[in-house]
Amino acid sequence: MKPLIFMVLLGAFLLAEAAEPKSAAEPPVPFPRKGKYGFRDAAGAFVIEPQFDYAGEFCEGLAVVGLGKYPGTKWGFINQRGQIVVPAQFEGAQDFSEGMAAVNLGGKFGYIDRAGKLIVPPQFDEAQKFNSGRARVRIIKSGYGYINKQGELVVPLAL
């Protein structure tokens, strides 16, 4: 290949690389040490020191964490800097999806937003993640159905 053509192609490649958006860094992952969970980065270094009794993966920038031993565990959420953004106050909590997370209060599930505000009051015996704006819920005596993000049934409960 002639040097001039090579330089033009190399320059075009470098410009294309610079224009490509870089993917966000991988979120840290939960990892146990001495009976507590912290979070490690891709290199294996703890970026959030072990301090939680239970910990889940980051979803939508937040991770569910549990404080206290079962059956008295309380669940909340942290950000990727390890700061508690939703205090550990729930009897159960699921990962965020579409900006909402199912949480258990008083034995029933409802949904919170990323700020921890209760959007759908606890009323369900089971609650799933949101997908395409709907979440499957269940009331044992009434059956399964789907709600929207306002908590309105969009597919009626049925056994």
Image (tube, rainbow, N blue to C red):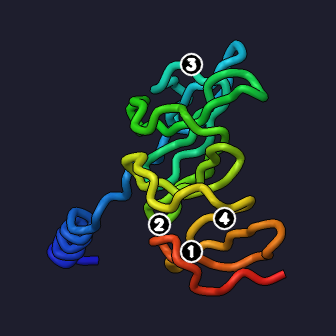
Relative horizontal placement of residue 135, taking residue 119 as reference (left or right): right
Residue located 48% across and 25% down the image:
48
The residue to which callout 4 is attached is: 128
Q: Which of marks 4 and 2 is nearer the N terminus?
A: 2
Residue type at mark 2? Glu
Q: Quadrant of residue 50?
A: top right
Residue type at mark 1? Asn
Residue 30, image x, y percentages = 61, 34
Circle 4/circle 2 CB separation < 8 Å: no
Q: Which residue lies furthest to the front in this view?
A: 141
Of tags 1 and 4, the one toward the viewer is 4
Q: Earlier in the sequence, mark 3 or mark 2?
A: 3
Relative horizontal placement of residue 17, taking residue 72 as reference (left or right): left
Q: Which of marks 3 and 4 is nearer the N terminus?
A: 3
Residue type at mark 3? Gln
Q: Which of marks 1 and 2 is nearer the N terminus?
A: 2
Q: In which quarter of the image is residue 138?
A: bottom right
The residue to which callout 3 is attached is: 51
Q: Which mark is residue 131?
A: 1
Q: Distance between the residues labelled 1 and 4?
A: 9 Å
Residue 6, image x, y percentages = 23, 73
Q: Is 1 drawn above or below residue 138 in the view shown?
A: below
Circle 1/circle 2 CB separation < 8 Å: yes
Q: Earlier in the sequence, mark 1 or mark 3?
A: 3
Residue located 68% across and 29% down the image:
73
Residue located 59% across and 50% down the image:
103
Q: Is 104 drawn above or below residue 139 in the view shown?
A: above
Local packing at callout 3 (Cα closer than 10 Å; few below 14, some 14-19, many 20+) is some
Local packing at callout 1 (Cα closer than 10 Å; few below 14, some 14-19, many 20+) is few
The residue to which callout 2 is attached is: 98
Of tags 4 and 2, the one toward the viewer is 4
